[in-house]
Image (spheres, grey):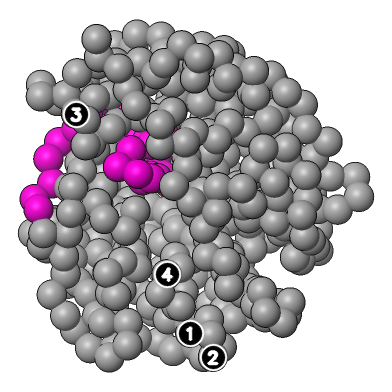
Amino acid sequence: MAANGKAIGCLVVLAVTLVTSCSSVPPQPNKATSDKNSAPATALAEPSPTVESERRFCRGVLAAEVRDELSHRWRQRWPESVIPFERSRSGGTVAAAVYGSAFSGVALVAASSGRIVRRIDAFGDPAVDQAGGQYDGPALVWKEYHSQQGLADYTVKAWDARTGQVRVIGQAHRASDGHMFPSPWQDPVLGDGYAAWVEGTDDRGAGDIVLYDTRHHRRRVVHRGHPGWLLIAGGKLIWAEAPRPGAMTEIRAIGLHTKRRVAPPAALVSLRGVWGFVSDGRGYAWVGSDSRSVYYAKSAGEPGRLVVRLRQGGFSPPLVLGSGVVAAPISAGGLVLSNGRRSAVTELRGAANAAAAGNHLLLVPANPEKVEHPVSGLAPLSPSDMQISCG
């Protein structure tokens, strides 16, 4: 999903998809705007009674110069509204949904200025269409949503950087009466030359996991069942699966090249009812089944540990992990940054969301004016910027 969102009246769609698997139901926001994030963009680290760090983690702050730079960038006004995709390979050029007078659609943009580097695919109806996905350099894969009333109506598209061609590689499934079956609320994931997503096939949480070879442009359904959250990491496709409707989800995996069942990473294998799991190529992070807790494992072979819990409310997707730092959006507004390697946690009340861009985090400001397509600047955080001080 795009990194900025406003809650809309489509929670029933998400509930049908996720409650059947007994995992907690994260809020399902509209991908373009943000009602929930109305704090001023300069309110960077106000103490909050909602955030409770795990006892071994200290409550800290970012360096003063970093906070000043965030405020400066968030006060900027860009010529277009830029909503970055969840993950891009480079910290300099990122994939995004762009809304402007000359072009609205999916594009590559400069993270520092919002300038369009390359137009990829124009929206058919910019007033309605939204998009979110991932970009790894050779390929860009995204879901394009065609309704403001929910996320069930979508197509899946892929762009090949070598040829410049855009392909339609998937779409929502329809019932006999014409309505769209709901799919789990997650954009396509991308890694190791493959993309994956779930296409819902009934109204009770059933779905197909589709694996797409971005090099050879081959689509294959690799699993039918009740799948939830997906991740590509360590040469594996990993997902949460409900063994039956109403059962607690468990973690399963297949090898990307063999398409055969393999053991999930040790960090995830025993988890039940979790969602939002992500990896930065080394560590893993996820949201617990209560939707109020975030966990982090330093490697695939280590068990995760609790890093932060909310006293009230919950976290909303997408969780982002970069250079060992977890960015977790709070449903009621704000963003928690947790440096799992340094055992430190801080809260940014002026942030709405984040995206991973290379080894940087790209912070999206809150939208106090609640406009449809905000034009505030984005704020890249380098690994050195993400050192949280607890002194």
- First-in-chain label (1 vs 3): 1
The relative height of residue 324 versus residue 243 in the rendered view (above or below) is above
Cα–Cα span, label 1 and label 3: 38 Å
Asked whether residue 317 is drawn in magenta, I would say: yes
Q: Residue furthest front?
A: 384
Which amino acid is tagged 3? Ser
Residue identified by numbered label 1:
213
Q: Cα distance, mark 3 to mark 2?
A: 42 Å
| Closer-to-camera residue (129/70) | 70
Which residue is label 3 attached to? 343
Q: Which residues are magenta?
A: 302-330
Task: List x then y, in percent, for residue 299.
Answer: 18, 54
Amino acid carrying mark 1 in the image: Asp
Do the CB atoms of the residues marked 4 and 2 lie less than 8 Å apart? no
Tell me, for residue 216, which label it has, or none.
Answer: 2
Mark 3 and mark 4 lie on one chain; the one further toward the N terminus is 4
Q: Which is more N-terminal, label 1 or label 4?
A: 4
**Residue at image location 54% in from the left, 43% down from the top:** 3
For residue 221: magenta?
no
Residue under label 4: 191
Q: Is residue 14 left or right of residue 34?
A: left
In the image, 350 versus 50, the foreground residue is 350
Image x and y of residue 349, in percent: 46, 18
Provide the secondary structure element on which disc 3 rests. Answer: loop
Q: Are marks 3 and 4 in contact (CB under 8 Å)?
A: no
Q: Is residue 1 visible?
A: no
167 relative position to 245: left or right: right
Q: CA distance from mark 2 to mark 1?
A: 6 Å
- Which quarter of the rendered picture does the C terminus lie within? top left
Instruction: Point out which mark residue 279 bears.
Output: none
Measured Cα–Cα span from mark 3 to mark 4: 28 Å
Task: In the rendered view, tell whether residue 349 sits above or below residue 171.
Answer: above
